[in-house]
Amino acid sequence: MPSKTLRADTLVVGSGPVGCAFARTLVQAGQDVIMIDAGPLMSPRPGAHLKNSYQYQRNVDLFTSVIQGHLHLLSVPPNDRPEVTLDPSAYRFDRSRFKGFVTDGQNPEQDPQRNLDAEAVTYGVGGMATHWTCATPRHHPVLERSDLLTAVEWNELYQEGEKLLNTRTDAYDMSIRHRVVHEALSEEFTELRDPYQVRNLPLAVERRTDDPSMVHWSGADTVLGPLAIMNLEEDCSLLVRDEASGGSLTLYPEHLCRRLALTPDGERVEYAEVVDLTRSAPIRVEAGNFVVAGGAVLTPQLLSASRVDRPALGRYLHEQPVSFCQIVFHQALVDSITTDERFTDRVNEHHKRSPEDPVPIPEDDPEPNVWIPVGEQRPWHCQIHRDAFHYGGVPPNVDSRLIVDLRWFGMVEPRAENRMTFSGCCHDTFGMPQVTFDFTLTPEDRATQHRMMRDMLRAASVLGGFLPGSEPRFVAPGLPLHITGTTRMGTDSQTSVVDTDSRVWGVDNLYLGGNNVIPGSNASNPTLTSVALAVKSARRILSTSPA
């Protein structure tokens, strides 16, 4: 029996930027919304970007350990290699009967040849937006953007999404390194034409006016806007009321939705079974509408646990191959900084302050954030920047000011065969069905990614030499954390899970949000598109809800 029953106009499962886009749109229209997240609150403002801390902006490499600490691997194949040095009296299992351990995170059902080895999720209020890169480009109108929406509708939704995320392209214009990288690549890629030439990377970020050497990275709290200023309630929930509309948002951290209970006819969600993880207390949440925005893995996982099975659930999984390297600036590029009149005052001031420093780049010079957009002849998205990732760390004896990261994001053709399934016997840390991946590339996909690598090498050769240990390579499958398509949008219930308003086929009051609803290929970062689609879906909820 539930310990208590909560009621709202809408329940939102998941507190990342997409869930927050739903919540803000609904609350500011007068709805009472409950939002839950299985993870804890990690900042005073719910869902804030943790990289806004002073120490991480002064040394971005320190942020790598923060990212690593918040990523939870999803499917680890069993390791069949025996521990030959184990004490002979210690426990050993019979490998002829058992494939491997379950309790240490291994998934005995996972084929290592078809796994997304590095695919992970973040459990915490704000989700991945507590440590994301904040890249928010619009998707290519032909290669990436779905034709289920008109160009006019896409443009309006993108504008709203960019407003919620605070997207801009001018935050790094004053950076010396940014200008040097931008100009060097522009001189190399002269064949590229507007709007697909070398450009500033669109970022959800704003340079601070009180200290221009620092920025404010957007998190889920940015999407909530005024709703992020919440009061702590007696039951440890967080509450805010929108005075203009009369609507409210109540956030429950460390609350897991285990199941959505359908009505006998299966046409509506009647209530959600939620557990307060801090007290092991079951809760029943009743609402007029239910939104699941838990990401591209946890959202289909909840649907599977709720027996909301659809033919396309978990299928058409798309994840990006990524080629990566780090370079150390060419000597000629560094020397050019000292002779460039645009930088004279800043370089001279730096030398006065640090006369023994051999590098002419000021310590507080912002990193570059340069972009080469995906194009029809170049089906890959290119980021040339310097940021913290859970891979590609810089050794302490190499000056980080001289390092630039190159990441080329590819795209593959969505296929029903690429999928995730959920176990009927194995469970994850939260007691939910264990996910298993089944993902491969076609020969055509492989050939395209080889072309992408060649293109990255062209750019790298212009900028400098490879950092030892970070020579060109393809990263582990799943490492981009950009899975899409697992509850894809469409017009056919056999090949999609939701309609063009992100409503689950056959369930009137169940809506989904996140990268999982994106139906096609993408090379560009998916967050902006997912937020835009969430706004569209939230408007649909409002149009069908009682006034």
Image (tube, helix red, strand yellow):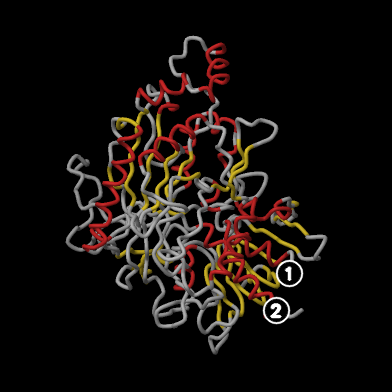
How would you rate the neighbour count of disc 2 (Cα within 10 Å): few for under 14, some for 14-19, many for 20 or more?
some
The foreground one among 255 and 361 is 361
Query: Which residue is found at the position 73% from the left and 50% from the top?
Result: 229
Query: Which residue is found at the position 58% from the left and 71% from the top?
Result: 273
Q: Position of residue 244 (x, y in %)?
A: 82, 62
Q: Quadrant of residue 185?
A: top left
The foreground one among 408 and 513 is 408
Q: Which residue is mark 1?
A: 31
Query: Which residue is found at the position 70% from the left and 73% from the top?
Result: 9
Query: Which residue is found at the position 35% from the left and 23% from the top?
Result: 331
Q: Which residue is mark 2?
A: 545
N-terminal-most mark, 1 or 2: 1
Mark number displayed over residue 535? none
Q: Position of residue 184 (x, y in %)?
A: 40, 35
How would you rate the neighbour count of disc 1 (Cα within 10 Å): few for under 14, some for 14-19, many for 20 or more?
many
Q: Position of residue 159 (x, y in %)?
A: 61, 59
Q: Type of residue at label 1?
A: Gln
